[in-house]
Structures are given as C-alpha cells and as structure tokens.
Image (cartoon, rainbow, N blue to C red):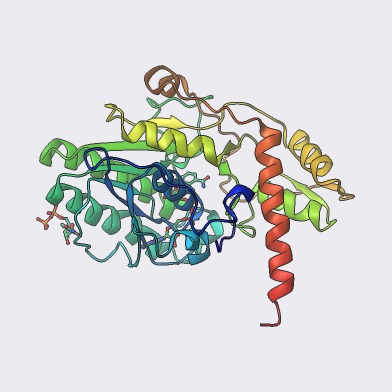
C-alpha cells in the first residue's frame, strides 16, 4: 500500500500514484536538485505522473524523505542523498535546480552554507548541464528584487538589495546563481531557464518557518492569536505548472512566476480563521529587520510568452494546505513519544 505524507484519496488503494506511459522518444531523464523539499516534491509528482524518469538529489537539510516516499521503489524514480556543493556525475536531459534553503530561518541558520549551495552548488549543476548537454532551470526568487522601489516588479527591474544585510546570503546567492546561468549560456552554450518565484504555499511547506500562511494556519488550528505581516501567495500546483511550461519553452531570460492578486494581511487572516473555523484572535506585531515592505509580481511576461497565470482559487489552495497541516499536527501528536 501507498505510504505518503500527502497523496489524494484515489491513489490510496494502489502501490504508486498513476503514471502515464511515454514512448522512449518523449520520456526524459530529469534531475531535480532539492527534490525532497516543498516545491521539488510536488514537481517530482507531476513529472513522474507525466511518465518521465526522475532522479531526486537532496542532502535533506530542509527536505524530507517522507515528501517523496510514495515513489521509492518505482522503476522510473531514484533518490540520491548528495550535497550539490560536491560535484555530481550522472546522465540526464533536464535539470530543475532547486537545491537551496528557502525560508529566512533556514537560510540564515548557516549563511556560509547557503552561499556555498547557491554559488558552488549552481556552478556544479551548470558544469553537469554543460557536460551532458542538458537544459537547466534555476529556481530563482523574487528576493533578487530585494526591497523594491517599484511596484509591481517586472523582469527588467534590477533590484534593491543590501549586500551585507541578514538576507544577503540568500538574495545575493541567488543573484550570483542567475549570473552564472547566463555566463554558462553565453560562454558555453548551455540552455538555461530562470524562474523568479514569488512566495508559494501548499501541502509539504514547512510548518515552522515563520511565513504568513503556515503561521496563520498553525495559529488558527491551535487557537493561538493570528499575527499580522505581508501579502500575496502563489499556490504550489500553479507554480509547478509554470516551472514545467518554462522549462519546455524557448525563453531563456528570467520570468516572474507569482500571484499578483493582493490581499491585505487582515483579509488573509480572516479567511484562514473562517476556513479553519478557529477562535484565534488576530494580533499585530512589529516588522522584522530587512523584511521587504511590499512585493508584487508583474506577470505579463509569463502570461504572454507561456500562457501562464495562477488559476487555483485562494480558498481552494488554503483548504488543501489546512488539511495537510491538520494531518501533520495529528501525525506529530501521535508520534511524539517514539
Ligand atoms: P525547501 O527547503 O522545501 O526545499 C529545498 C530543498 O533543497 C530541500 O529538500 C533541501 O534539503 C535541499 N537542499 C538544500 N541545500 C542543499 C544542498 N547543498 N545539496 C542538496 N540539497 C540541498 O524549499 P522550497 O520552498 O521547496 O524551495 C525550492 C527552491 O525554490 C529553492 O531554490 C528556493 O530558493 C526557491 N523558491 C521557493 C519559494 C517558495 O515560496 N517556496 C520562493 C522563491 C524561490
Ligand atoms: N561538474 C559536475 N558534474 C559534471 C561536470 C562538472 O559536478 O558532470 C562540476 C565540476 O566539478 C566543476 C563544475 O561542475 O567544478 C564546473 O564545471 P566546468 O566544466 O564548467 O568547469 P571546469 O571543470 O572546467 O572547472
């Protein structure tokens, strides 16, 4: 039977989630670095179900085996415990390079390691792409825009980043990673794709990383006060579709993938509170240092060139995420004495 942290009910009677048959010509060998994390594991699900061969490389710093365990043993799937800061020699057709801690507490935990992962790790994956002729998609971030002076941000904006602030290891690490992609493209002819991802939420996101959706859902489920900070989130399934569209497009310049819809944080808090049917109070807290005041994607490029835009209604995404969080809390409660 299927073992999984998060798989919808119809799969439960089968050993693996259903996988499409692809002819050898259409089947790709795909490497996902950071594939045991939040975004990577959902991308693994999509590419596996589409019928591709997927190799996940992860050092399990923030990722978990549990996120991909429902594929372990499948003939199209491989999980490698490896740190991208070390060279990697395998044969693949496409690389989704996602390995990097992504939330402030995680990337600030060891800033030097965050820098190494984003610089040396990206260099290694570009070296791999160059050797095997694979296309590489970099999971970049809206954080390359820093604390933006223009709203909304389109891809032409160069950003406003403090190079020595507490977030610099991540922001500047990703900026260098982008620079490396285009250096390998120009100098070595490597095909690159760069997705500038804006905050995304969904199942398997980290429960305790201090981000707005996870905080609110946890606080609402536990009847604690809902603290109030920043807006606008993209649902994970919309992101994964955007990443695959971008990978298979002919657009090599950076593309924003985000949700331009704006909600005040109060609306967000109220919506989560009502979906969870919680008695939590809503409370206001001071801003964290260097926290960008406002960030909103301009997604006209993705719309025009990829035909992509978020389609999952906020309530639906939130409901799925809330279900996941309550299952996780239950799981933790049941396992705390083991
Ligand atoms: P995550 O922490 O859930 O996943 C990152 C994965 O990378 C984890 O499985 C972790 O163990 C792995 N990893 C970290 N360092 C590694 C190393 N040196 N070698 C091998 N594996 C390593 O985070 P996520 O939210 O899934 O983010 C995935 C990617 O998307 C990241 O590159 C992140 O910067 C980018 N991104 C995410 C968001 C978002 O809202 N989630 C927004 C912008 C950008
Ligand atoms: N690399 C890798 N896997 C490969 C090919 C290269 O991990 O299949 C690493 C290699 O260790 C090197 C980096 O990628 O440090 C950059 O490779 P490139 O060929 O661009 O540089 P060079 O090896 O010439 O320094």
Residue at the (17%, 40%) spot, across then down? 190
* Drawn side of residue 174 relative to residue 205, left or right: left
Which quadrant, please, contains the C terminus?
bottom right
Residue 279 percent coordinates (x, y): 90, 50
Left or right side of 268 for 115: left
Q: Is residue 324 above or below residue 86?
A: above
Tell me what residue is drawn at x 39 percent, y 67 percent.
59
Relative to 165, is 328 above or below? below
Splitting the image into four quadrants, where does ligand 2 fall? bottom left
- The image quadrant of residue 293 is top right
Question: Please, is residue 152 above or below residue 199 in the view?
Answer: above
Q: Relative to the observer, which residue lies in front, 225 or 247?
A: 247
Which of the 4 quarters of the picture holds residue 26? top left
Q: Position of residue 324 (x, y in %)?
A: 67, 53
Residue 3 visible in the displayed image: yes
At a point 69% along the width and 67% down the height, the residue shown is 331
- Point out the residue furthest to the front here: 13
The total of numbered circles placed on residues is: 0
The spot of residue 167 in percent (x, y) is: 48, 52
Along the line of sight, which residue is nearer the eye, 177 or 304? 304
- Say which residue appears at 73% left-offset and 73% top-offset: 334
Position of 38 with respect to 23 (left or right) is: right
Of the 4 image quadrants, the one containing the N terminus is bottom right
């Amino acid at each position: 039977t299927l073992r999984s942290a998060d798989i919808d009910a119809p799969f439960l009677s089968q050993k693996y989630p259903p996988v499409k048959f692809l002819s050898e010509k259409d089947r790709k060998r795909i490497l996902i670095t950071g594939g045991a994390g939040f975004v990577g594991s959902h991308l693994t699900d999509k590419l596996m179900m589409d019928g591709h061969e997927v190799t996940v490389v992860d050092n399990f710093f923030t990722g978990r085996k549990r996120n991909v365990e429902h594929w372990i043993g499948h003939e199209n799937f491989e999980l490698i415990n490896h740190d991208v800061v070390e060279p990697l020699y395998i044969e693949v057709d496409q690389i989704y390079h996602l390995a990097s801690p992504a939330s402030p507490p995680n990337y600030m935990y060891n800033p030097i390691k965050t820098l190494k992962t984003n610089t040396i790790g990206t260099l290694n994956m570009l070296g791999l792409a160059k050797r095997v002729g694979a296309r590489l998609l970099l999971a970049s971030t809206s954080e390359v825009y820093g604390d933006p002076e223009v709203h909304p941000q389109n891809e032409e904006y160069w950003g406003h980043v403090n190079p020595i602030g507490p977030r610099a290891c991540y922001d500047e690490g990703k900026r260098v990673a982008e620079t490396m992609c285009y250096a390998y493209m120009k100098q070595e002819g490597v095909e690159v794709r760069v997705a500038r991802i804006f905050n995304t939420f969904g199942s398997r996101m980290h429960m305790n990383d201090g981000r707005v959706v996870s905080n609110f859902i946890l606080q609402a489920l536990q009847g604690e006060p809902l603290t109030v900070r920043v807006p606008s989130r993209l649902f994970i399934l919309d992101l994964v579709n955007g990443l695959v569209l971008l990978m298979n497009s002919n657009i090599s310049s950076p593309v924003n993938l985000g949700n331009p819809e704006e909600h005040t944080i109060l609306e967000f808090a109220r919506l989560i509170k009502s979906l969870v049917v919680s008695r939590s109070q809503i409370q206001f807290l001071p801003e964290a240092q260097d926290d960008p005041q406002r960030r909103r994607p301009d997604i006209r490029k993705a719309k025009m060139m990829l035909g992509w835009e978020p389609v999952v209604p906020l309530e639906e995404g939130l409901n799925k995420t809330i279900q996941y969080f309550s299952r996780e809390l239950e799981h933790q409660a049941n396992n705390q004495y083991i």
